Image (cartoon, grey):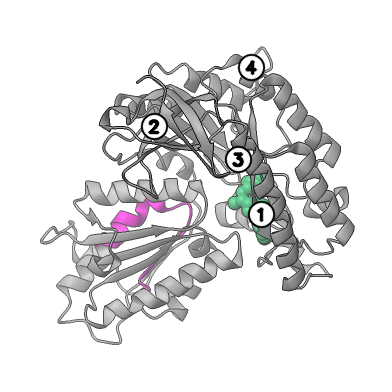
Amino acid sequence: MSVARKSVRAIFPAPLRQSMPKVFLKTYGCQMNERDSEQVARDLVSRGYEMTGDEKDADVVLLNTCSVRDLAEQKALGKMGMLGRLRANRPEMVFGFLGCMAQSRGSELTRDIGHVDLVVGTQKFHRVADYVDQIWQRKVLLRDRLMDDERFSIVDVDEEAGSQETIREHVLEERQATAFVSIMQGCNMHCTFCIVPSTRGSERSRRIEEIVREVEGLVTMGVREVTLLGQIVNLFGRHEFPKSAEGLSPFVQLLEAVHAVPGLRRLRFTSPHPIGFRDDLVDAFRRLPKLMPHVHLPMQSGSDRILKAMHRAYTVDKYFALTEKLRAARSDIALTTDIIVGFPGETDDDYAATRELVRRVGFDNAFIFKYSQRRDTPAAEMGDQLPERVKEERNQDLLAVVNELAKAKGEALVGQRVEILCEGLSKTNPDRLSGRSPGNKIVIFEGGERHIGEVFDVQIERSTGFSLYGNPAIF
Ligand code: SAM
């Protein structure tokens, strides 16, 4: 960690609480980032800070960033640039970058963007509240004494042993039915396109007892469903814990332990890798009734040549065989995926093979990404980078295929009764409620307070392809 100038701890030994600032915290990227932000919010709230959704009302602005694609980085940089204008009338405002881009760019961010005071990497989220305290105290208390040209900033992007154990507390909204639980950090896969191993470090897993305790606590607070999160979630514990006597992987042992938590109704996980997705995990979908029938299984490409260049150590045949095994374990299983189009050297034939595999698997939905060159990744240095136009064409073409598949999957549920967990008001229409089917499809319906947080059947009346609409069957 580097702290510019003198540490404020030396100046103010104890936190001061004259007027507690309001914090605007915006998250970019994946569910793991969402979860990290929840921990940061919880730490700030427990010190008396107030969270606000209105950036103009904020004293502290924190952007928790994503580096997976350049677009995500540009969005966060653009937002920080715009927000900097707020500082004109309120020089005491604190501005910080957290997470993946903070990790990869470090002090470059305080150097290049004049108003950024704080940069905190992916193994230091638990230090954010301390740092905000320090900067805020210094800015407010020394307001009149600070020279205009005196910059005080904190950059902490160090590694920290045991940081995976620090993302474990929650601030729940009223009647929150579903929660994310971070079970590990880092990734050892080294896919040639991906920046994550360098922003998140190597794989480190939490202890099973700790995770179970966290889930028990959530259930006591009313949560009915948890989603276990990891970059490669199925590789949980492979460095730390042995297989069980019956040959179950540490991840399947964890699933069993969480499944046994009384009062928990539903269990999910994301994202697994096809490598290490063994029969014990496929079989868990047969054996564990709370484990919801949905797998988000990143495929990336339908061409063996491109998979090899991506350093994804499976073939199209192996990937397809895994989806068949999952369908044999649970015929109602929903499959979704991530696909990259326009990887360096991807030919028309390679792309056609991807399109073909998408149809053959018959995904319920997919995230399609145009390949984005990431710094310090092997693919960024490969020859034959494709023009943006080709990436865009393939992206649009594949989106049309995926939308058609999603529509057909939704329509197949019309007329059926589907069990849902009601999560609360619909985000698009607050007069309606929203829940999720076992296969993770959004279901919108008219109902009342009594439905929130409950599991019950909904009769599906229609589908738009992305959402299902229905009526509660009896409740
Ligand atoms: N850990 C998961 C895995 O690899 O199986 C996925 C995590 S990553 C945050 C989410 C998705 O972003 C990846 O599955 C991939 O499709 C996409 N992605 C990662 N790097 C990318 C890049 N350089 N350009 C475009 N998409 C990318």
Please report the bounds of the magenta region as a residue range: 116-133
Q: Earlier in the sequence, mark 1 or mark 3?
A: 3
Circle 4 SS class? helix
The yes-or-no answer for disc 3 within 8 Å of ligand 1 is yes
Q: Position of residue 401 (x, y in %)?
A: 72, 50
Q: Would you say residue 149 is visible in this rendering?
A: yes
Residue tagged by mark 4?
286
* Number of disc labels: 4
Circle 3 SS class? loop
Task: Report the amino acid beneath label 3.
Answer: Ser
Residue in the image at 17% along x and 56% along y: 14
Q: Is residue 235 left or right of residue 458?
A: right
Q: Position of residue 372 (x, y in %)?
A: 67, 65
Q: Is residue 267 magenta?
A: no
Q: Position of residue 142 (x, y in %)?
A: 17, 75
Circle 2 SS class? strand
Residue tagged by mark 3?
271
Q: Would you say residue 315 is visible in this rendering?
A: no
Residue tagged by mark 2?
422
Residue tagged by mark 1?
368
| Quadrant housing residue 378 | bottom right
Q: Earlier in the sequence, mark 2 or mark 4?
A: 4
Task: Report the amino acid beneath label 1.
Answer: Ile
